[in-house]
Each structure stands twice: as structure tokens, then as C-alpha cells.
Amino acid sequence: MVTLNNESVMKTLDAIYDYSLEGLPTSKSVYELANDYLSTNVSVENAVENLIQNQVKKCGTSGFITGLGGILTLPITLPVNMTSVLYVQMRMVATIAHINGFDLKSDQVKTFVYTCLTGKSMTDILKNVGIQFGRKYSTNIVKKIPGTVLIKINQKVGFRFLTKFGSTGIINLGKTIPVIGGVIGGTVDILSTKIIAKNAVRLFVKTE
């Protein structure tokens, strides 16, 4: 078992985020991935749609961890199985944000990416800090979110992950990880990845 607290959860997310942007030795950077989809699709909307479809399939494909060998080198505390899923999901969200013109180096965008990963809890987390849905978030709106609000969001995100792993902050590998070993099979929760993708679309995809 692995003991976690809010600080270690956020450090883990930060580490995965950095690797997501730059890519592992076996995978492209977010910027390269975004350019690939933009160059092979007729519109931003189609690029995002195809990206989501492919990333969801990747999370549900047996043995996808074998293509992410660099995950083993990450300086984090989560098991490799869980880390690999977070890596794919976070990369998907960050790519969607970049495709739509958001600066992935900004603290605001990074916090929003993390919030997407909380799944169905995202709406409540943002409402609790005074951020209401009903309008699309432009790059200018995101830039104006103050640091004090970001701290509150990150605290709630960290707590959500702790709650997900167990009320005591201890990960029970037998209950949390579909397969204890080097490879995740088709039992990965594809539904959660789809929910995360919808969150990213709600936050980052621009509509007329």
C-alpha cells in the first residue's frame, strides 16, 4: 500500500503534467500531438473529436503500458498502472486545451487540466469556488482567475484524489488497480476517460 496526502498528490500531478507536455521517450509532446491532429483534420472540432476517440481506445487497449516505458522513470509515488492512465488522460486534456489556443504553461490552465481529471466532481469543485458554467472560458477569462482561487481549486482537486484512493489516503492496490502487474487490460475504466474528455470540451473548446 502507498500512503498519500494532499501535497504528495499535487506533486504527482505536477510531475505527470510536465512529462505530458514534453512527452516520454516513446511518445510525442503535447505540441507535436496537437499539430498532428490539426494537420490531418478539416477543423478544430474534428481534431478534438478524433483525439478523444483515439485516447479513449488507448486507455482500453490491452498492453498500452508497454508503449509508455518512460513511465517507469517518473519520480512519483503512484503505481505504474495508475500513473499510465493519468498520463494518457492528462495528455488528452492538455492537447485539447492547446488546440484551442490555451497556454499550457500558465498556472490557470494547468489547474483547469487537473480539475478535468476529477470527472463528475468537476462542476461542484468549480461552483464551490465561485466559477459557474453557462459560458465558455476564453483564454482571457482564464488568465484573470486569481491565484487565491487557484489554490482553493487545487486543494479540492487533491482532496478529491485522496477520496478516490481511500478516505485514509491509503491506496489499496487490490481494489484500485484492475490488474496488479505491468500491463492493464481491457478492464480500464473507459467511461471515466470519456467523462474527463467531456470536461475538457466544456472548459476549453470554443464555440461561436
Image: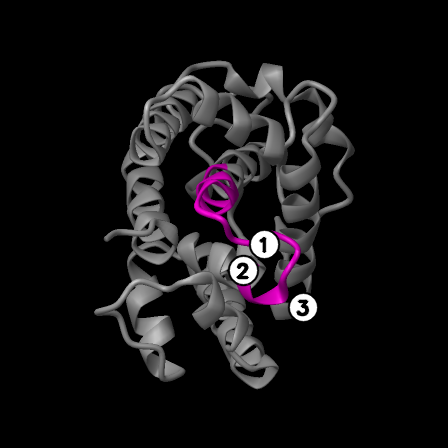
The CA distance from mark 1 to mark 3 is 24 Å
Residue 109 numbered tag: 2
**Foreground: disc 1 or disc 3:** 1
Give the residues in magenta: 92-109
**Mark 2 neighbour class, 10 Å CA radius: few under 14, some 14 to 19, many 20 or more:** many
Question: Considering only vertical position in the picture, is 122 above or below 207?
Answer: below
Q: Residue at x 67, y 68 (%)?
A: 7
Q: Residue at x 70, y 49 (%)?
A: 15
The kind of secondary structure element at disc 1 is loop
**Foreground: disc 1 or disc 2:** 1
Question: Considering only vertical position in the picture, is 156 above or below 178?
Answer: below
> Which residue in the structure is indicated by mark 1?
103
Q: Does label 1 or label 3 sit earlier along the sequence?
A: 3
Q: Are marks 1 and 2 in contact (CB under 8 Å)?
A: yes
**Foreground: disc 3 or disc 2:** 2
Place of residue 72 in the rendered image (x, y in percent of width and height, measured from the top left): 73, 29
Q: Does label 3 or label 2 sit earlier along the sequence?
A: 3
Side of 68 relative to 168 (left or right)? right
Place of residue 45 in the rendered image (x, y in percent of width and height, measured from the top left): 30, 35
> Which residue in the structure is indicated by mark 3?
7
Q: Amino acid at mark 1?
A: Asp
